[in-house]
Image (tube, grey):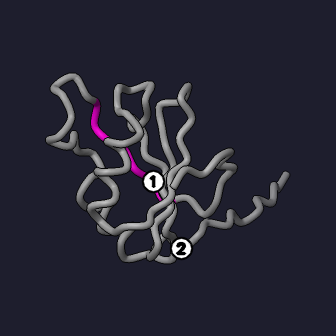
Amino acid sequence: MLLEIAELLVPDISLLRNIICANSSPLCGLPYDELERMFSQFGENCDFAVQSQRSYSFVIFQTVAIAHLAYQELHGQIPSELNSNALPFYIAFVESGNYCCILS
């Protein structure tokens, strides 16, 4: 018996400017204003979607280049501004998402 497997459609991450960042929410001890300050250093006018009962946040950057710079600098890192109990940020690019509420 042969099974046909549908080809997965994987977006080209070099074209994406939206990220999901794990360990980056008030639930993880990171206040919204601190999150905003950390990601705004890569470019002003980013939008954020943060749910207080989730351990992740979404960040929407103005350009692809800025999103990739933030990824290179923060993925797998514990930002020095955070306390010693903080967990590393784990970042992935997302095409889109149900952000619920965008904070900017």
- Residue 79 included in the magenta stretch of the image: no
Horizontal side of 26 relative to 8 (left or right) equals left
Task: Report if residue 91 lies within the magenta region.
Answer: yes
Q: Callout 1, which amino acid?
A: Ala
Front-lying residue, 71 or 5: 71
Q: Residue furthest right?
A: 1
**Image point 21% across, 34% down: which residue?**
82
Q: Are there few (<14), some (14-19), or many (20+) residues within 10 Å of tag 2?
A: few
Is residue 16 depicted above or below 98 in this figure? below
Residue 73 is situated, as x and y percent measured from the top left of the image, at 23, 58
User: What is the number of the mark on residue 74?
Assistant: none
> In the drawing, what numbered circle is on residue 92?
1
Give the residue number, with chain letter if any, for mark 2.
Answer: 12
Q: Of the residues under marks 1 and 2, which one precedes in the sequence? A: 2
Where in the figure is residue 93, as x and y percent of width and height? 48, 59
For the residue pair 3 and 61, the one nearer the viewer reads as 61
Q: Residue at x 53, y 41 (%)?
A: 50
Count of marks, rendered view: 2
Q: Secondary structure at mark 1?
A: strand
User: Residue 48, position in %: x, y?
Assistant: 50, 52
Magenta-colored span: 87-93
Residue closer to the observer: 47 or 96 = 47
State the CA–CA distance, disc 1 to disc 2: 12 Å
- Frontmost of labels 1 and 2 is 1
Front-most of residues 50 and 84: 50
Residue type at mark 2: give it: Asp
Residue lying at 82% horizontally and 56% vertically, measured from the top left: 2
Up-down: is 71 above or below 43?
above
